[in-house]
Amino acid sequence: MHDSKVGDSILNSLVRSSISFNEDRLETLFQDFVACAVLGDKHYGAKVPALSTGITERAVTLGLYASALDMDDVDWKVLTHPGSIIWATAISIGIEKNLSLKEVFNAAAYGYRTGATIAHFFGPTHRSRWHVTSTSGAFAATSAAAIALGLTEQQHLDALHICAMNIGGSPQAGFERKGAPQTNRAAAISLGITSAHAALVGAPLVENIWDGPRGLFEMFSVEAQSSEILNGIDTAELRLIDTNGFAHSAVTAAWKLTSAISENVDSITVFLPSSVAAILDASRGGSWWNSAFAIAALWESKDPCNLQSAAQFLAITTLEFEDMPIGAGKVRVVTSSGAHEEYVERAPEEVSWREIKWGKAGIVSAEDSYRRCSSFPLSALR
């Protein structure tokens, strides 16, 4: 039996407690978001976006673009992709209301804190049945929108209740490996902005969002095992490697081995967490979701930012799964001198990799990045 008072206490803390954040880290997350959006804009290639004006329309477009290449940020602690939702919301309101970049950062900080805390509170069972980036992301967007729009604390709390009445997001979007999580993110963005606007005008809401057969605990399999308030910023990490995020640590491990091994390679074995076996069995999604391909391509190019060809090494590369933390990876290479192994728990944010990604998008400063979000196409350098 869960206690609704715990859930209410968390929401109250998220709304009423003071917030502090590392502004330099937020600036990095922000510029990476814009880089993702610019590259996504190029990927879509639409001359005139269907949705491009007004707060919600701009935010949805930015969110779709930022997640298009599956390189938006990731929080491995709670297994969400927060930035493409939070920044799209805060930036779009900022542009409409002429907010300073510092004010946008403040709104985003609230979004990161709310999203991470809610995802952690909802827990693993919820995550196994729902797309947690969508559910926690809607709460994150609501907080970001509430702060950016200047809602009172009570209106902010009301907005979170309105959001809770409407959350959703099927995990099937991710399992099909066809990019549908982009639209899950866009829906979360739209819901967050709608919830904040509804609270602003005093729309009706449900007071008890937690209890009973129609409450969040039961409907959304909320575990409610931790009431810890997370800031969400410190655990958000950039994705800079040219393959799916689950394989980044394995690619890093292979990258380290390439500099240590000069012999001919007899075999390469990639080890990933057992918890992602159903996602990364290479049965769908093409080379992006084939981690054996990624490691073989890395061995060919020696460049984690260029994993396009695996012709030389794919035939001798195999994929296995074993017990390790999600996000970790290991690679074993066998040569005539024996077996060489490297394990990496978290892929680093190598500055050179970041510069390649940001360079492709023309990112030069936070101020310029904010300016570029004010009109489409984002890919047009200004």
Image (spheres, rainbow, N blue to C red):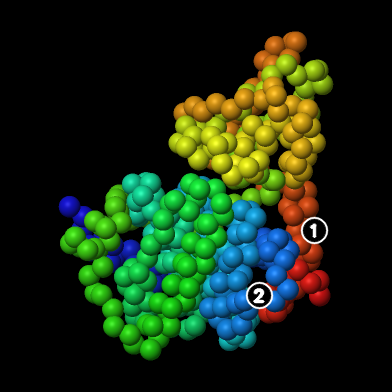
Q: Can the viewer see residue 12?
A: no
Q: Observer-nearest residue: 268 or 104?
A: 268
Q: Observer-nearest residue: 75 or 135?
A: 135
Residue 87 point in image, percent of width and height: 58, 68
Circle 2: residue type: Pro
Quarter of the image where one finds residue 331: top right
Q: Is residue 56 above or below residue 219?
A: below
Residue 180 point in image, percent of width and height: 53, 57
Residue at (59% x, 44% y) in the render? 285
Residue indicated by mark 2 = 49
Q: Can the viewer see residue 128?
A: yes
Residue at (80% x, 58% y) in the render? 359
Quarter of the image where one finds residue 366: bottom right
Q: Observer-nearest residue: 320 or 303?
A: 320
The answer to whether 66 appears left or right of 310 in the picture is left
Rendered image: mark on residue 359: 1
Circle 1: residue type: Gly
Question: Mark 1, residues whose alpha carbon is within 10 Å: few (<14), some, or many (≥20)?
Answer: few
